[in-house]
Amino acid sequence: MRRVTVVLYGATGYTGVLVTDELVRRGAPFVLAGRNREKLERVSAERGRGAPVAVASLDDPQSLRRVLDQARVVINCAGPFTLAGEALVRAAIDTGTHYVDSTGEQTYIRRVFERLGAEAERRGVALVPAMGFDYAPGDCIARLAANDLEPLERLTLAYSVKGFGMSRGTMRSGLEMMKGGDVVYEDRDWHPAPRGVFRTSFAFPAPIGEQSMARYPSGEVITVPHHTRTRSVNSLITTSTVAPGPLASALPYLTPALALTLRTPLRRALGRAIELLPEGPPQEERRAAEFTIVAEARAEDGRLGRGVVRGSDVYGLTAVTLVHGAELMWTEGYDRAGSLGPAAAYDPGGFLDYLTGHGVDWDLERPPD
């Protein structure tokens, strides 16, 4: 029988250190893995209570397989995932190791489902990308809002995030997301996202209220259709989340040009500039960030369902969602396999209930018939 071990890959980054803290809190045996032994040993000594370290490179598949060989689960925090994630997923499949990660990159999530899911299912391995603060609660509340209403005409997810200071890793992933390649889900299939000006609004619960929205290439556009029968998935984010102050009103017009610009050498220059920034927001600022996610399900017969998730400390919550997901996987009897959204990998109501102990609240509304 395998030892109950978690491998944390990308342990020295901003999110990886927070996941290390959470693994220590759970008392689970774990290994800190990545490319730089000196940095890994520092995290082990300062935050990991002397946890063992293992050096493995994403361009050395044998080293990855060697590190994962005795693990039940690997948690991947090393992005940008579009550039670096697939090698670790393939090593997880080869070694029979369940996999979760913190990606926000829709293009990568789609790749995990389309290229790697079938082989993972044959091997009895669960692949659950997009387990961060946003897509894990979002995918779960979407599934619960749709209960008893399928088939749906449309499922809409709307995000409002305030006070969110990005880590360097998130910024690097953001550059990958903004250069294009994202999709929309319409008429029961995925299509390239339109590049023109997009303007709409959405009514959040009080005190947020009506907000100007931008199209959001979120993970649920990929994950929700795999577990919920719906004609369309619509994902939105408040323009004030993406562009502060006066820029928010101009965002619908700036986005198409920005996507084209990021296909030029400017993207490399921005990447170098990101490396000069702090690793991530300080603790007080991190904990002050707040989010609201609304899922609205409209059935083909006109019935409506609505779910709301609220929380704070987006990076701290990401550490909790990753480790709790891994914990459910390393428990004896876990038998789900293939590429899965969080709501398919776990019980969505139970997962959200667990998060209520970490500053999250959620509820469902069903208008009377």
Image (spheres, helix red, strand yellow):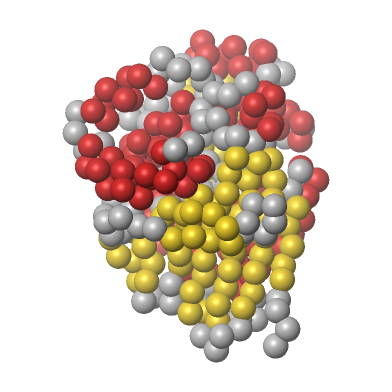
Relative to residue 121, is residue 18 depicted above or below? above
Given the current orientation, which residue lies at the most extreme left position?
Answer: 264
Rendered view: 104 above or below 284: below
Q: Is residue 154 left or right of residue 174?
A: right
Residue 365 figure quarter:
bottom right
Q: What residue sits 63% from the left and 46% below the top?
A: 291
- Label count reads 0
Q: Quadrant of the C terminus?
A: bottom right
99 or 150: nearer the eye?
150
Q: Position of residue 164 (x, y in %)?
A: 57, 35
Quadrant assignment for the N terminus? top right
Q: Residue at x 57, y 73 (%)?
A: 297
- Residue 194 at x, y = what percent? 28, 59
Residue at 27 percent across and 56 percent down: it is: 196
Task: Tell which of 283 and 343 is nearer to you.
Answer: 283
Q: Is residue 173 visible?
A: yes
